[in-house]
Image (cartoon, rainbow, N blue to C red):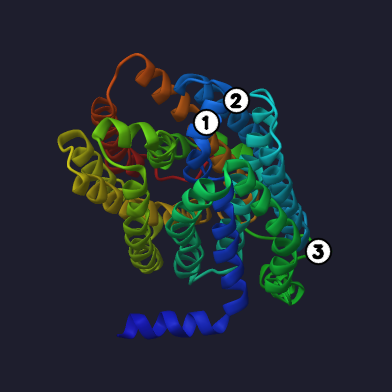
Amino acid sequence: MIRAMSIIAFLSASPRFLAFGFFTAFASSFGQTFFIALSSADIRAEFDLSHGDFGLIYASATISSAGLLIWAGRKIDDIDLRSYTCIACIGLALACLGMASAGSALWLVPVIFGLRFTGQGLLSHASAVSMARYFDSHRGKALSVAAMGYPVGEALFPTLAVALIAMLGWRQMWLGLGVVLLVLLAPFMLWLLKGHSERHRQLDMRAGSTGGVLKLFGSTRAQVLKDGRFYVLLPSYLALSFIGTGFFFHQVHLTQSKGWSLPLFVSFFVVYAIAQIFSALVSGLLVDRFEARRLMRFYLLPAALGLAFIAAFDAPWGGAVFMAFMGLSSGAVSVTHGAIWAEIYGIAHLGAIKALGAALMVLSTALSPPIMGLALDAGITMEQIALVCIAFILFSAALVVFVFPRLNVDPA
């Protein structure tokens, strides 16, 4: 009861800014793999692409977006948050319109680049960095509130998109989405950021800024790249994005191989979202109490259990259990990843450091569709892929538990 009241009091203190964190995460859905993949079967059919072909197109676009995100992500340290967010919103709307008008397989590369760069990249980045930077002792709770935008989007949009594609076609679905985002998204975000100048001024005052430049403690990105802890955490940091992206990207094939209907599996995203919301709320409290680095020891284990159900069972309920356990890990990951770099390296260069981590995460999401697609083309089953993913999760957890504490020193 005390925890519930503390969360309620926290929400009432900064409702509009917390809503900004939530809705930037929510809007990023349109650049996330789970949403783009809902059109994958129609796109492959229209342009005569195999699983591997489309995976390679997707990978090339996503890798390009990851490379640019290293540069663009650090700009959030220098550019006003309102301008940064507006650029991302308009870019996402234009990318949706581009998807609707794609005339060839080659045209998919810049379109998917735009969706991934602005949606998964910039909007997710703005959500996490803003919550981690402007909240200190309540960072975990702020990140958990913002992170709920991801599961809410994952719960609402798959069913809606499948219905719209069935009624109107995939191009019309993307066209309508682009028009709505172009007209509404940026003005709504600016309204949520009303009063941000005062918030930033207060942060400046706490940090003792001079001439508008923040004087905050923290490592530079160059120092982070020399720190062994960064590389030890990377496998755990990237594991779920690689695995989740691969399975969601190939969800059509997964359902076909298991004998499930696609609408049934899409309905399991509601289970995924509920588990993710619960996990994000609990993880926010745990991060504030115990720190994110401790949570990283355990947060991938539910995903390993979910993958075990995919490997062992063909009954539809196995898909629901898989989505529930993936949601538990995903909720914890979304909160923990938002806090971990601020905890270890400070917030002076948080945008640059978070951009590096985000770019590597985007890169992992770029690699998993073609790698899994080529594996599927070679006759490897989804069950076998699940077993390999479980092994990687256990390896990542072992690094965090046994190696990271031995390197727990400040970077040179």
Q: Earlier in the sequence, mark 3 or mark 1?
A: 3
**Secondary structure under the numbered disc 2 in the rendered image:** helix
Locate residue 200, reporting x and y percent. 72, 70
Residue contact at pointers 1 and 2, CB within 8 angstroms: yes
Tag 3: amino acid? Gly
Residue beneath label 1, please?
Answer: 366
Res 319 visible:
yes
Mark pair 2, 3: CA separation: 39 Å
Q: Quadrant of residue 101?
A: top right
- In-front residue for pair 202/104: 104
- In-front residue for pair 314/230: 314
Q: Residue at x 60, y 60 (%)?
A: 24
Figure check: 269 above or below 61:
below
Residue beneath label 2, please?
Answer: 60
Would you call the spot at circle 3 few (<14 residues within 10 Å), some (14-19), or many (20 or more)?
Answer: few
Tag 1: amino acid? Ala
Tag 2: amino acid? Ser
Would you call the spot at circle 2 few (<14 residues within 10 Å), some (14-19), or many (20 or more)?
Answer: many
Residue beneath label 3, please?
Answer: 212
Q: Which mark is nearer the camera, 3 or 1?
A: 1
